[in-house]
Amino acid sequence: MHHSVIAFLALGSNLGDAAGHCRQAMDEISRRPGIRVLRASSFYRTEPLGVRDQEWYVNAAIEIRTARPPRDLLKTLQGIERSMGRVREGGTRWGPRVIDLDILLYGREVIDEEGLCIPHPEMHKRRFVLVPLAEVASYVIHPKFGVTVKGLLERLEDPGKVVRL
C-alpha cells in the first residue's frame, strides 16, 4: 500500500452545465476508493485559452488525500473523464470539453515521465488554475520553484479573466 499524500487537482468544463459537470466530477472522485476530497475551491468562470471562439469555462481546484500512486491517480481521473463523455483522441487542443481533470501537485513529488508531469507543467502560467488553487492551497510550495501558490499568482502575467461564480 502506497503511503497517503495530499494532492491538488484542477477541474474544468465549458460544455452544457459546466458547474454541474464539475460538481459531478468531484462526487465521482470522492467515491473512488483510496481518495478523500478534503477541500474544494469556489467555482470560477474563466476566459478560454488558445481557442477564443468557445464558451467560457468553469474551473475549480480540490485538495485530496490519496493512497494511490500518481500514475494510478491519473488513470482514475481519465476514467472519470471518459465516463462523463470526454473524448481526448483527435480533439482540438484547448478546445471545448465536458470535463478536464488534471493533477497539479502530488505531495512534494517532481515527476517527468511519458504522459505524466507533476507538478503540472503549465500551472504556474495559468490564472484559471492558480486562482482556485490559491483559495485552497495559498501557502503550498511548488516543489520545482520553491515558491508558494500565492507567490506564483502574485507574479503571474496571464491576462485571462477569472471571476468567482
Image: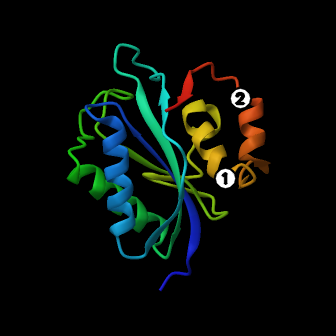
How far apart, in angstroms, are the residues tagged by discs 1 and 2? 16 Å
Q: Residue at x 40, y 68 (%)?
A: 72
Q: What colour scheme was applied to this rendering of the protein?
A: rainbow
Q: Pointer 1 and pointer 2: residues touching (CB < 8 Å)?
A: no
Please tell me which residue is depicted at 66% across the width and 44% down the height of the picture. 134
In the image, farthest residue toward the bottom: 1
**Residue type at tag 1:** Ala
Residue nearest the viewer, comparing 26 with 3: 26
Q: Is residue 125 above or below residue 75?
A: above
Residue 25 in picture, x, y percent from top left: 34, 52
- Residue 35 image point, x, y percent: 44, 70
Residue 145 x %, y %: 75, 47
Dot 2 surroundings within 10 Å: few (below 14), some, or many (20 or more)? some
Q: Which residue is mark 1?
A: 137
Q: On residue 50, which mark appears?
A: none
Residue 12 % position (x, y)? 41, 39
Q: Which mark is residue 156?
A: 2
Badge 1 or badge 2: first in the primary sequence: 1
- Residue 126 in view in this figure: no
In the displayed structure, 44 sits above or below 112; it is above
Numbered label tally: 2
* Residue type indicated by callout 2: Leu
Inspect this view and state whether residue 54 appears.
Answer: yes
- The residue mark sitting in front, 1 or 2, is 1
Q: Residue at x 45, y 20 (%)?
A: 50
Q: Secondary structure at mark 1?
A: helix
Q: Which element is circle 2 on?
A: loop
> Relative to residue 154, is residue 52 drawn left or right?
left
Question: Is residue 29 shown left or right of residue 105?
Answer: left
55 vs 105: above or below: above
* Residue appearing at x 73%, y 38% in the figure: 152
Find residue 17 and report its image quarter. Answer: top left
